[in-house]
Amino acid sequence: METKPTSSNFIKTIIADDLNEGRVQQVVTRFPPEPNGYLHIGHAKSIWLNFTMADEFGGRTHLRFDDTNPLKEDVEYVQSIKEDVAWLGYEWEQLFFASDYFDEMYNRAVLLIRKGKAYVCELTAEQIRETRGTLTEPGKDSPYRNRSVEENLALFERMRQGEFQDGQMVLRAKIDMSSPNINMRDPVLYRIAHAHHHNTGDKWCIYPMYDYAHPIEDAIEGVTHSICTLEFEDHRPLYDWVIRECEFEAQPRQYEFAKMILDHSIMGKRYLRQLVEEGLVDGWDDPRLLTVSGLRRRGVTPEAIRELCRETGVSKSTGGIVDPRMLDHFIREDLKLKAPRTMAVLRPLKVVITNYPEGQVEPLEAENNPENPEMGGRTIPFSREIYIEQDDFMENPPAKYHRLFPGNEVRLKHAYFIKCEEVIKDEDGNVVELRCTYDPETKSGTGFTGRKVKGTIHWVEASQAVSAKFYLFESLVKEDVDDEADLKERLNPNSLEIVQGYIEPGMQDVEPQDKFQFFRHGYFNVDPKYTKEGNIAFNRIVSLKSSFEL
């Protein structure tokens, strides 16, 4: 994979200094998703950063699943995450699961108890919240905080053996209930959950909390730079406490950066899950979603996503909201030299060219991509009957309308000039057919200079046209609704339009994920879910024009 170097940023500077000063011999990073949902474009930024930083300094990156909560996790998510990371263009050095370390985590918890640094607490989750205090008031000690080491060891072992119900007891760190950092006020390290785990089965009924498990995983794996997003900044003292008090020789360090958030979008796993589970979208890979699988199905390229990550940079400041049109810009930049140009009629209107010979089908030559001559050309058929776009005809046009109307002449892309002579309507007054004439002297490529026309429209020959569905997407979220509003109130009811039209006959054997630029319509991707058994479906990736500028 060919990648551009990242620009200077604070994490890059930290890594360079660590190497120069000898604190680190080889850079080791990790991407540690919890397998409780599908990845979204915000995760793509973290993937890009972890892998790119390691690559630029000759290090390695691990893929690790933080699977410490069996109530929310599933092998479906494990598989989808592996596919997403690989599709984005990254190869992990090693694959790990947090659950592989459950024995070691348990042993280190026992060590904490023996050192008087952890205790078994019988307060409920609600009671723990109530006694934790506030930002201005210290917390209150648990009545179980001063249990003896022996009693704590016995109770913790009984927790492991399954003698207690879910929520009946937890293991808490014994730190400082008056700490100005609430995360240090005796946080929970273990909770009881009688649930089947995808990796360890029914071996465990107690499971470590993320803040306890994560630093241990990093230490075991030799991670040098634990890069995460800013919401974990206040958790860093606890991260360091666990490393120190669990007596690990390795000393990973945590560094935080600002998330990449696309404006007017839905990115949180909780909201994405709600959309999927309530049937408000077409699964986790709905092309309107910003999940990596949804972007892939829509036709977005990994190159465009990586370029978006690189261009938005790495910052310590919050509030870095990204205009979604920036992603669209990079999609166009990536596809303009890759995607073949072709013609598709999305809302067909039949045109009969009355002076063209009946039964004759004429081959016409067209370039596949004028910006990339190496893509060669193709032959398209032309005959007496064609389809054009309904929007390319108006019976009573406004001024400066340069497409087809009664008495007006336009150029057919790659073909001839045609002139509208007659309009055919049904009994309800709807236009169903146009009768036109063509000028055989005006064939494209012949150098005709006799006269000029102001409009050029696309078309598809009718007898060989291939039927196709086109999925046209708009933002899933209304722009004029507050982001804090109820999820369903935020949804745009017009985010999807499905139309039936035609493509050139040479496209009948397209494969899922093939990408094209349809003249005047934009870039489209062959949908992998609905293209099968002779049915062809296209997702519009992005339109051709944008007002966005870098």
Image (spheres, rainbow, N blue to C red):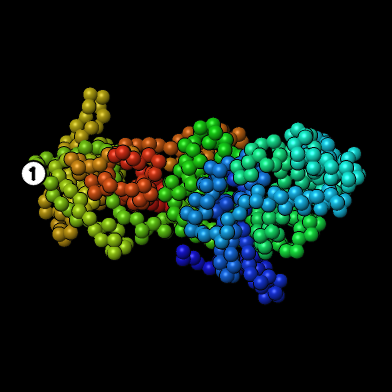
Q: Measured from the top left, where is residue 235 in percent x and y?
A: 74, 52
Can the viewer see residue 366? yes
At x 17%, y 53%, the residue is: 364
> How many numbered marks, from 0 up?
1
Indicate the amino acid at tag 1.
Answer: Pro
Q: Is residue 449 above or below residue 119?
A: below
- In the image, residue 52 sits, relative to residue 401, either above or below, namely below
Q: Secondary structure at mark 1?
A: loop
Q: Is residue 358 found left or right of 171 in the rendered image?
A: left
Q: Residue at x 68, y 55 (%)?
A: 217
| Residue farthest toward the top in the current orientation of the protein | 427
Residue 232 in sight in this render: no
Residue shown at 10%/45% (left/top)? Answer: 360
Q: Is residue 332 left or right of residue 92?
A: left
Query: Percent x, y for residue 117?
Result: 85, 51
Identify which residue, 75 or 543, lies in the foreground.
75
Q: How dense is the environment of label 1, judged by Cα within 10 Å: few (below 14), some, or many (20 and up)?
A: few
Residue to which mark 1 is pinned: 357
Q: Nearer the viewer, residue 195 or 469?
A: 195
Residue 242 in percent (x, y) is at: 77, 55
Taking 371 as reference, is 364 left or right?
left
| Image coordinates for residue 4, horizontal then vertical, percent | 50, 67
Q: Nearer the viewer, residue 105 or 469?
A: 105
- Residue at 57% across / 52% down in the picture? 43
